[in-house]
């Protein structure tokens, strides 16, 4: 039972970690490309 609980907790943590990584990378790239597009090209 303890192993099953630990496995389910690890699965939830993995899902949360992958979601946060995707979310932060999306926000970073969105702001990065927005900043690049707003900069005047020399």
Image: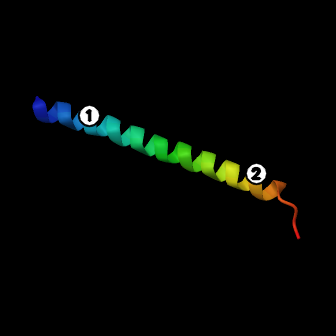
Q: Position of residue 8 (x, y in %)?
A: 25, 33
Characterize the local packing of mark 1: few (<14), some (14-19) or many (20 or more) Cα atoms within 10 angstroms: few
Q: How is the image coloured?
A: rainbow
Q: Where is residue 28 in the image (x, y as percent from the top left)?
A: 61, 50
- Identified at 47% across, 42% down, the residue is 20
**Relative to 22, is 4 above or below?**
above
Q: Give the labeled residue for mark 1.
A: 9
Q: In this view, does 35 lie to the left or right of 12?
A: right
Q: What element carries label 2?
A: helix
Characterize the local packing of mark 2: few (<14), some (14-19) or many (20 or more) Cα atoms within 10 angstroms: few
Among all residues in the image, which is located at the extreme bottom? 42
Tally the marks: 2
Q: Position of residue 29 (x, y in %)?
A: 64, 53
Which numbered disc flags the more N-terminal residue, 2 or 1?
1
- Identified at 87% across, 66% down, the residue is 41
- Identified at 26% across, 34% down, the residue is 9
Q: What element carries label 1?
A: helix
Among all residues in the image, which is located at the extreme left? 1
Residue nearest the observer in this picture, 38 or 8:
38
Q: Give the labeled residue for mark 2.
A: 34
- Identified at 54% across, 46% down, the residue is 24
Q: In this view, does 19 lie to the left or right of 8?
A: right
State the image quarter where residue 16 is shown. top left
How many angstroms separate mark 2 from mark 1 (CA)? Answer: 37 Å
Tell which tag, 2 or 1, sits nearer the viewer.
2
Residue nearest the observer in this picture, 2 or 38:
38
State the image quarter where residue 1 is shown. top left
Quarter of the C terminus within the rendering:
bottom right
For residue 26, which numbered disc appears in the image? Answer: none
């Amino acid at each position: 039972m303890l192993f099953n609980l630990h496995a389910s907790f690890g699965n939830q943590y993995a899902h949360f970690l992958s979601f946060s990584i995707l979310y932060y990378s999306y926000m970073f790239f969105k702001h990065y490309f927005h900043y690049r597009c707003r900069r005047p090209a020399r």
